[in-house]
Image (cartoon, grey):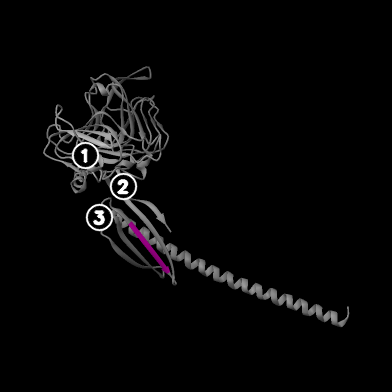
Amino acid sequence: MGGKAALFLVLGFSLIFMVAGRNFNSLATSTVDNFANYYFDTKAHHLAASGVNLVTNQIFLDGAMADQTFNYTFDQGTISVTLSTLNAYQNIKQLLSVGTYSNVTSTIRIILKPSSFSKFAYFSNSEGANIWWTTTDTVWGPLHTNGQLRVADRPVFMGKVSLDGSVVKFSNSAQPQFLGGVQTGVHITIPSNGATNVGVAAAAGGANITGHSLVYLEFRGDSIRYKYSSGGSWTYVLASTFSPNGAIYANDAQLRIKGRVKGQYTIAASGTGSDRGKIFLDDDVYYNTDPRVDPNSTDMLGIVAQRDVIITENSANNSNIKVQASIYSESGSFQAEDYQNRPVSGIIDLYGGVIQNARGPVGTFSTNHGVTTITSGFSKRYRYDDRFMIANPPFFPGTGSFEIVSWFE
């Protein structure tokens, strides 16, 4: 190889290595910059998440906390968290958490709503010493009791079961099916102001019925009719005009209901004398559009009684009853009238949930050679309305805590 060729070869390699070295140096510098930026972004995000955890813990401890801004200095960064109310009626709150580290910010926004008892397919404060879940009973959705869960033969629980007591078997042969799992040692207190809170909402923009000890009310799709005695005349009204905000409240009265519900309503009764504060189901109560047929249905009903919710003993209810609602019995039970003497009446086809202070009886049964037979009243088919996991009837009683329903970052 000649002298010039060797010189060009050396110069060429030198140029190649010089360019490559510059690129390697630039790549190394970019790697360091990217690592630093990632570190700053991650630190800022963790600060924002820490702000969410700090403030949500305070909200869960104090559900009545006022709107305000919280400022923290932590781990060489700063955190600013703003709590604000988006909907005062439904107590929907927003938490905006901004974490800052080395002039880099990260923002997390969450939406919280009050936890509602409608999230339960079944809830009881106590179960009663002689009331049993049997082979003919099936419950879909979350179930909770603060008492003992008494089971005979082979009842099926499709959702998660939580309880403060224990599982008690009618006999050693009982084989309850807990398909969603079981958690013990969980206690949830049922409040004493669920019905009256619906009354507050009804007075503010719903239907507040006072001065009558007995109220008959029938949902008829877009309309509602009502009267104040069995032999009285019906008054017909447009449902949306009768209760614009969806709260219907019978103060110090007995309430008897039935019909086809179109829209979103919570109907409540208060009172402690005689049969006041009780709600009787005189016939089927069901949605205009069944959510099981049309998932886009927005029909929703809450039934809230200060005392008992009772399936009336009448001819209409002696061959099954259909109830589509979340039922709440504050100090009483969901039960069947004259359950031990009424004829075998088919099933309670419930789509929604039952929340009650004490489990009420709906029928009786006998067991012979491992076979369970209903001898009076109803067997149960309780199917959970999955919409109640994230939504609830208007002004339905809450558990006193909040749940995070949305998280944006």
**In terms of image quadrants, where is residue 248?**
top left
Residue labelled with disc 2 = 115
Disc ID at residue 280: none
Range shown magenta: 94-100
Residue 16 coordinates in the image, percent (x, y): 73, 75
Q: Is residue 106 magenta?
A: no
Q: CA distance from mark 3 to mark 2?
A: 13 Å
- In this rendering, position of residue 138 left or right of residue 204: right
The answer to whether the residues at label 3 and label 1 have Cβ atoms under 8 Å apart is no
Q: Contact, CB < 8 Å: mark 3 with mark 2?
A: no
Would you place residue 40 above or below residue 230 in this image? below
**Residue drawn at the location 55% of the way across and 68% of the way down:** 34
**Extreme-right residue of the structure:** 1
Query: Is residue 95 rendered magenta in the image?
Result: yes
Q: Residue 293, how many percent across, how many down?
A: 40, 34
Q: Amino acid at mark 1?
A: Ala
Name the residue: 76% across, 76% down: 13
- Numbered mark located on residue 64 in the image: 3
Q: In the picture, which quadrant includes the N terminus?
A: bottom right
Secondary element type, mark 3: loop
Within 10 Å of disc 2 (Cα), the crowding (few <14, some 14-19, many 20+) is many
